[in-house]
Image (cartoon, rainbow, N blue to C red):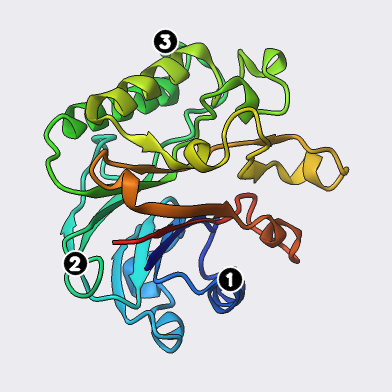
Amino acid sequence: MLSVATWNINSVRLRIEQVQRMLREQSPDVLCLQEIKCQESQFPAQALADMGYIHQAVHGQKGYHGVATVSRVPLREITRFDWQDNGEARHVGVELTEGEGKGLVIENVYIPAGGDIPDRELNPKFGQKLDFLERMTRWSDTLGRPTLLVGDFNIAPLECDVYDHKALLKVVSHTPLEVETLGKLRDAHGWVDLGRHFIPAPERNYSWWSYRSYWRQKDHGRRLDHMWASPDLAPQASTHRFVEETRRWEQPSDHIPLITEFSL
């Protein structure tokens, strides 16, 4: 059995104690973090190594974005793609090199949020998000190995993936154009959305709540975080869950972890 978690931590240095708590309580073999918001030299590598997560691949930058994959299982970093084509640290790919999951590729990605206006001409950030997804789609066409694609996709694709479908149709993260573009990425490799494979629509399955609305006790969530398996890996996924209690911790990330277990 191999368990893999993904979590947009929204500053790993600020929330390292929460990362440690989650690792103690959930004990995944591999943890993929997004939005670490630090350079590689500032990453709390030793704190995680002390917990057994000694194998690490960190792609960071100063103050913003950044991704990291840490593991109790030996791994090697294999790729760092710049799908936004602007030098931002938004991806790291690793291959597990020993044990039950040997040969498994885990792609950890932080897709751009896309700004506030869903119009490429008025908002360049929205265009960058669409271009990022299109480059990922071309990349997906080339894959030929068991692969797990995880991270903060910043898109809630299904009507039931948001608290109010009609109200959010013109809100970045749930617009028809974003959903269509994400669908092309999914179809390019036949990716299996494990979140909806194990928690079928329309069951509640949110991974993000804004800081403002969550604490007003309104369940205004969106499913922005995802774990997708390649067609040859998906049948080996045995369980999938979201860990919502982290959202109730003191000064939490606005995202929660997802964890999938595989019988490899």
Residue at figure coordinates x 56%, y 79% from the top left: 24
* Image x and y of residue 251, in percent: 72, 63
Residue that badge 3 annotates: 121
* Image x and y of residue 263, in percent: 35, 61
Neighbor class of circle 1 (other Cα within 10 Å; few <14, some 14-19, many 20+) is some
Q: Give the residue type that dot 3 points to.
A: Glu
Residue that badge 2 annotates: 102
Would you identify the image quadrant in which residue 10 lies? bottom right
Kind of element beneath mark 3: loop
Give the quadrant of the N terminus: bottom left
Residue occupying the far bottom of the picture: 50
Residue 107 appears anywhere in the view: yes
Residue at figure coordinates x 36%, y 70% from the top left: 70
Residue that badge 1 annotates: 22
Q: Which sits earlier in the primary sequence, circle 2 or circle 3?
A: 2
* Image x and y of residue 29, in percent: 39, 71
Q: Give the residue type that dot 2 points to.
A: Lys
Residue occupying the far right of the picture: 216
